[in-house]
Amino acid sequence: MALKHIGYRAFQTVLRLTSYLMSFRPPELLEGPGSLARLPDLIKGNGFRKVLVVTDKGLAAAGLLDRLLSVLDGAGVERVLYDGVQPNPTIGNIEEALALFLREGCDAIVGFGGGSPMDCAKACAARAANPRRTVRRMRGLLRAGRKPKPVFAVPTTAGTGSEGTVAAVIADPETHEKYSISDPKIMPRWAVLDPELTLGLPPRITAATGLDALTHAVEAYVGRSNTAGTRAMAEEAVRLIFANLETAYKDGGNLAARTAMLRASFCAGTAFTRAYVGYVHAIAHQLGGLYGTPHGLANAVILPYVLDFYGDAAAAPLARLAR
C-alpha cells in the first residue's frame, strides 16, 4: 500500500510539472447576448467551406438547434447535422459523427450544446485528423496525435466549461468506463458565449450545471497543481456562481444572471484545464460510466462529502475561497 501511495504521488508530481510546461492558446471568444449571430462571419472569415454541427436531439426538441441552423443557413454557411450525441458521449457517437464528417467533405466542426456535444465534437475533430488512431489509443494525456480539425464550441449550458478545456470525456460502453482524452491540441479554437441560448434551461439543469462549474472551480483551487493564474480564475468563477446561480435558478429569463453564469463556467473550465480536478470527478465519472448518471448531478451530490473527507487538508484554501 505504501509503495502504491508513493507511485501515485510521483505520478501527480509529473502531471503537475507537465501542466506547468504545457503551452496552449485559449479559444477566441465571441461573448454577450446575440453573439451567436456573429458565428457565420467567423466561420467564413477563416476560410471554412462546410461545417459538421454536432449536437443532441434534446436541443432540437427544445428549439435551440433551429436558432443555430437558421443563423448558418441565413448566412449561406453549408452545414451537415449529427444530432445523435448521448448524455455521456460514447465511442460510437464519435465514430458516427466522424463518418458523416468524412463522407460530406466537411472542413470544420461546430459543437453545439452542453459538455457532451462539445466533447464529442473535440474527439471527432481529433479522429478526423488521425484516422488510424482509435479513441481508445487517444485515452490519457498528450495522445491525440496530429493537430485536430478546427472546432467552434457553442455552449447552451453554463457548467462544463468544455469550450475552454483541453479534455474530452468519453464513455466506453464495452468496459463501462468514462475516461478523458487530454491534450492541448483538442481545445476549441473559437467559442461563442451567448447567454440567450441558456434562457430556456429548466431549473434542475440550471442547478446541476451550475454546481458542475462550482465543482470545477473548487477542485482546481484546492488541488496541488494550482497556480496564481488558475486560482484567480477559480476565485472569479466562485464569486460569479454565488452571486448569480440562485437568481438564474429562480428566474431563468434573467439575462444578466445567465451571462454571469456562462462566464463563470468558462473561468472554471480554464482553471481546471491546467490545475486539474480531484476525487469528486474521479467518483462522478465512475457513476456516469456505470449507471449513466448525469455528470453535473453526480458532482453536486458528491462534492460536500469529498470536501468533508479532505478535512484540514483543504480547510485553508476553502477559507480563502469563501472570502
Image (spheres, rainbow, N blue to C red):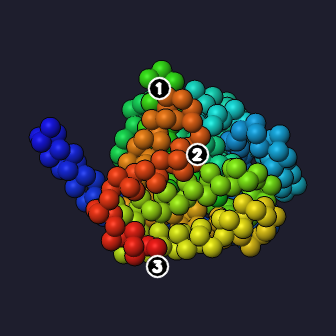
**Residue 107 visible here:** no
Position above or below: 222 against 14: below
Task: Determine the residue positioned at 64% across, 43% down.
Answer: 117
> Counting other residues with Cα less than 10 Å from the Cα at mark 2, is it few (<14), some (14-19), or many (20 or more)?
some
> Counting other residues with Cα less than 10 Å from the Cα at mark 3, is it few (<14), some (14-19), or many (20 or more)?
few
Comes first in the chain, label 3 or label 2:
2
Q: CA distance from mark 3 to mark 2?
A: 26 Å
Q: Amino acid at mark 1?
A: His
What percent of the width, then of the height, locates residue 229?
A: 40, 73
Mark sitting on residue 225: none
Task: Determine the residue positioned at 49% across, 35% down.
Answer: 287
| Quadrant where the image shows the N terminus | top left
Name the residue carrying label 3: 323
Circle 3 SS class: loop
In the picture, measured across the screen, residue 77 lies left or right of residue 303, that is right
Name the residue carrying label 1: 176
In the picture, measured across the screen, residue 270 lies left or right of residue 154, that is left
User: Of 83 and 41, which appears nearest the observer?
Assistant: 83
Q: Amino acid at mark 2?
A: Leu
Q: CA distance from mark 3 to mark 1?
A: 40 Å
Q: Amino acid at mark 3?
A: Arg
Name the residue carrying label 2: 297
**Residue 50 visible here:** yes
